[in-house]
Amino acid sequence: MKNFIILFFFFNSLILADTYPNKQIEFVVGLGQGGSADRMTRNMAIFLEKELKTSIKITNKKNKASLEAANYVLKQPSDGYTVFSSTFLPYLPNSILSGQAKYSLDDFEIINLQWFDYDFIAVNKTSEFNSVLEIINHIKNNPNTLSAGVINKSSGHLLLKLLLKKFDIPFENIDIKVFNGGKAVRTALLNSEIDILITAAQGSEAYRDKIKALAISSAKRSRRWDAPTLNDAINDSKIVMPIINGPTRGFAVSKEFKIKYPKRFKILKNAIK
């Protein structure tokens, strides 16, 4: 009888593996609702539900710049029913290098990286500022009169701090406000809660008619925005900024899932592909 029960559960597990997925899949977004990673996931979910023939639940874990989401994904059963959807760069390396994370990059299997973005510096359409150097000079000469919005620990956050450092401006000269998602920081600019926005450029295109792009963090100009590259924008200062790669978004699962269920992993990967 004991052997029969063991065989029953063994063959039953094989059947379940062969029919994957046979229940709802949870996609965990490592940032807030309405941001670029969230929109990417919700748009993809429409097609993935048809491809995988199952429903998809989307959960936003927006706190601590994807750290909360990464921890949540790794704590779930490694059976293919939890997928990590986020802006992986720079958040995953940032959380590891800062010592906050107990995981490593090897704990995840990146299925794809499908959205490579770049950051830009922008202001409200009605702003008096028309160039990055105007803003820098204002911050130097009028400390504590401007605020800048960034997503916490994002490439835009790093870009702002590096720009201030290059121009020998103390961080205390500007009120740096951090947000947990793209929608929140862009809404803050539109509502005049902040004066300057440093965030993903492509993810901001829905707000094109309400904001003014002053510079993009890229080696060359973009046809999407009528704005110079950052180094062109600050050329008169003779200061050169390194090009910081912008947000990189995609889908991942735990490495353990790929090892334990290679067939399921292949089904999921092919569906996303």
Image: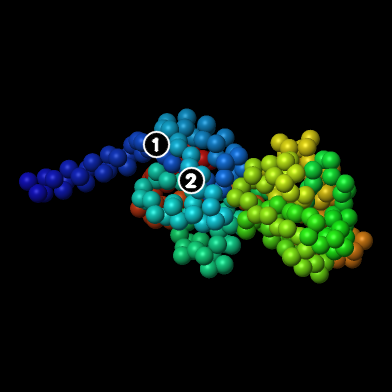
Q: Residues within 10 Å of mark 1 (few under 14, many from 20)?
A: some
Residue 118 visible, this angle = no
Residue 74 in view of the camera? yes
The amino acid type, in three-letter code, at marker 1 is: Gln
Q: Which residue is mark 1?
A: 24
Counting from the top left corner in percent of width and height, residue 12 is at 23, 41
Secondary structure category for the residue under label 2: strand
Residue 38 % position (x, y)? 57, 41
Badge 2: how crowded within 10 Å, few (<14), some, or many (20+)?
many
**Residue identified by numbered label 2:** 28
Q: Give whichever of 190, 66 is nearer the camera.
A: 190
Q: Amino acid at mark 2?
A: Val
Q: Quadrant of residue 71?
A: bottom left
Which quadrant of the view contains residue 136? Answer: bottom right
**Residue found at x 72% / y 63%:** 161
* 34 to the left or right of 266: right
Q: Give percent across and percent down for residue 98.
A: 57, 67
Farthest right residue? 236
In the rendered structure, find residue 139 and report the number of the disc placed on it. Answer: none
| 98 shown above or below 186 | below
Percent x, y of residue 17: 32, 42
The residue drawn where x is 46% and y is 65% is: 102
